[in-house]
Image (cartoon, grey):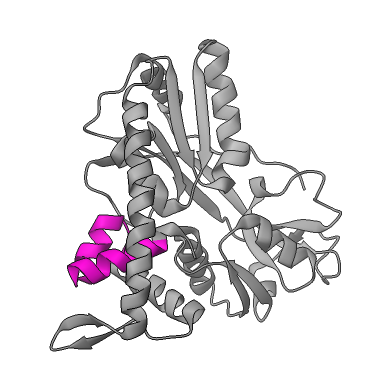
Amino acid sequence: MNIETLKVFRDLSDTGSFSKTAELNYISQSAVSQQIKKLERVLKCKLYHRQAGKILLTPCGEKFYAASRKISGLYEGALKAIRTLGQERPPDEIKISTIYSAGIYMLQNYVRQFLAHNPGTKVSVEYRQFSQIYQDVASGRADFGFMACPYRKAAGLAMLPVAKDEMVVIAGAASPLAGRKSVNVKELNGQDFIFFDRLFPSRRYIDAFLRGHNIKGRVKMELDNIDTIKTAVASGAGISLLPRSAVRDDENGQSLHVLRIADAQFLRPIYLIYSRARKLGPAARNFMGIFETPKKVPARRP
């Protein structure tokens, strides 16, 4: 459970509308429904029911609403203060919000390239959930956002494809696949999988790839963090499909084994997100210049 989920619950209670809540939080209506269901599983109680087309809170929902409204209000107050500071930042500073898997490898290379030609510029990078990145860029908290596989457009935001990240199979040391360099797609059929949570755009992209190749596996876990996915794979709970850049060289061949997909190309698109309405400063415009043409993330050898 995180603050963003509390905000979704609060907004649904306030608006009484899944579509308005989705718009306020830059997510899909399906994601709103899934987040509420996840809350109910965690809290082990029903939070609302429908009556005559209206959304009504249960006694449990009313109690939880009071807490979520208070916490969300504190969070939004802090964000407002941060945004004020962000608007006052000097023109030689840029702020970036990124998903973890894009930031740990791909973004670092771009930042180094940028600083080589713009010494003295301050670059701040913060790792965030995908839904938070939309809000960061729209509010001005960040100049740029980096996301994988955006599943919806957001009003006022531009999405520029800048890279393609190779997706690979990750197996633990005890897996029958360990020690191999590659795997054919058909060999994934019937495997135990550890996936991203269904809310994540990358999960939808992975599901589409597997459906396109008629691959059916057993979903053993659904997690919201790459490090926890890697830990679960290393423990022998199953295999996963992750970006190659998410596995460090010192992990490959030890606790984890990276296998390329030999008979299919599986590249995850990475997008740079920025506001159409906000004028970019000199440093931000120079950073944008790096992405004049799409680039493929340099491949590592497993």
Give me the residue at 56% from left, 21% from top. Answer: 113
What is the total number of numbered labels drawn onto the structure image?
0
Give me the residue at 31% from left, 26% from top. Answer: 87
295 vs 225: above or below = above
Q: Is residue 172 left or right of residue 74?
A: right
Q: Position of residue 275 (x, y in %)?
A: 28, 35
Q: Position of residue 152 (x, y in %)?
A: 31, 56
Which residue is situated farthest in the left direction here?
Answer: 52
Give me the residue at 39% from left, 34% from top. Answer: 142
Closer-to-camera residue (59/245): 59
Q: Main secondary structure of the magenta part?
A: helix
Q: Position of residue 111 (x, y in %)?
A: 55, 25
Closer-to-camera residue (152/29): 29
Closer-to-camera residue (62/130): 62
Q: Position of residue 20 (x, y in %)?
A: 20, 63
178 vs 214: above or below = above
Give, as a single range, the part of the protein colored magenta. Answer: 5-28
Q: Is residue 81 left or right of residue 227?
A: left
| Residue 20, magenta (yes or no) | yes
Give me the residue at 83% from left, 58% from top. Answer: 255
Q: Is residue 133 left or right of residue 197?
A: left
| Residue 15, magenta (yes or no) | yes
Res 88 quadrant in image: top left
- Quick check: can you spot residue 68? yes
Closer-to-camera residue (224/58): 58
Q: Is residue 283 left or right of residue 213?
A: left
112 vs 193: above or below = above
- Quick check: can you spot residue 159? no
